[in-house]
Image: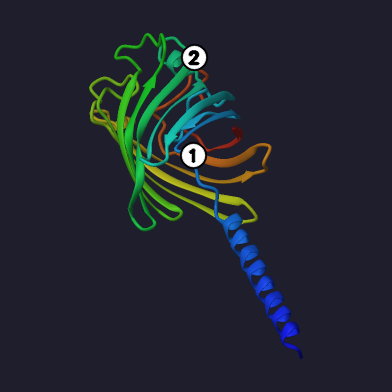
Amino acid sequence: MTSLTKNFTLAAALTLAFATMGANLAYAEDAKPEAKPDNEVSFNAALTSDYRYRGLSQTRLKPAVQGGVDYVNNPTGLYAGAWGSTIKWTKDLGGDGDVEIDLYGGKRGEIAKDIGYDVGGLYYFYPSNGLHPSANTFELYGQISAGPFSLKYSHSTTNLFGTADSKNSGYLDGAFNYDVYDGYTLNLHVGHQNVKNFGAGSYSDWKVGVTKDFGVVTVALAAIYADTDAYIGPNGKNLAKTGAVLTISKTF
């Protein structure tokens, strides 16, 4: 082989090597997950067959329309949002109003690798509810999570949802959300509501459900129950009885 041929062969090999390296580097860059923007805003809307909160129906076991908006600052973990739903329970107690508006804000992040935290405050606002004490409620909350598990405690700094002398009531709940197969997520929940100075109003609740994101919408089906007969609607139905709840939602 002549010197000229050797040089040409070496040059071709080097050119191919650098071209392959460049392609691999470009592929590696493309394979990196897309970085999140510093600030994100999202909206959500839902239709549910029964608005259950801590096991209790807020709509006399009837459907509700819901929606909200969320903001998060990714570098700091700070977030804020608002959410609303149609309700009926304030009228059941002799008041007025048919809407609940939740305003919240807090901070989430990691304590250690794979151990997350979420702390903040939540104000439940019931316009023109007319109850005495008012149904409006403020809670502070803190949550610890690890993988599919989470444990949360919420503490009221006001009377709890119109119950007299119930300041400093607390709700402790645990959840397990696990992707079991092909995007189907198992949802397990158990909680206990302690109502200060109203022992008959304290109770435990649970939920077993499954959620599937179909892209166009997310569908959730759950069985929900609370072990109390202290919450009865004007139609005589137990608002804590076991019920199947179907929810169709969309985040955009």
Q: Give the labeled residue for mark 2.
A: 98
User: Residue at 23% of width from left, 22% of height from top?
Assistant: 165
Residue 185 has which mark? none
For the C terminus, the quadrant is: top right
Element carrying mark 2: loop
- Closest to the observer, 82 or 221: 82
> Which residue is pictured at 52% across the width and 23% down the height?
60
Q: Are marks 2 and 1 in contact (CB under 8 Å)?
A: no
The first of marks 2 and 1 along the sequence is: 1
Where residue 95 appears, as percent x and y from the top left, is: 41, 10
Q: Is residue 88 above or below residue 73?
A: above
Find residue 110 and report its horizontal and vertical position in percent.
35, 50
| Quadrant of residue 23 within the rendered picture | bottom right
Q: Is residue 219 visible?
A: yes
Q: Secondary structure at mark 1?
A: loop
The numbered disc on residue 37 is 1
Q: Residue at x 52, y 38 (%)?
A: 242
Amino acid residing under circle 2: Asp
Q: Determine if residue 239 is in view.
A: no
The residue closer to the viewer here, 184 or 60, is: 184
Count of numbered badges drawn on the protein: 2
Q: Mark 2 packing: few (<14 Cα in 10 Å), some, or many (20+)?
A: some
Q: CA distance from mark 2 to mark 1?
A: 37 Å
Q: Residue furthest bottom?
A: 1
Quarter the N terminus occupies: bottom right
- Choose top left, top right, bottom left or bottom right for residue 119: top left
Percent across and percent down for residue 121 are: 32, 31
Question: Residue flagged by tag 1: what amino acid is it?
Answer: Pro
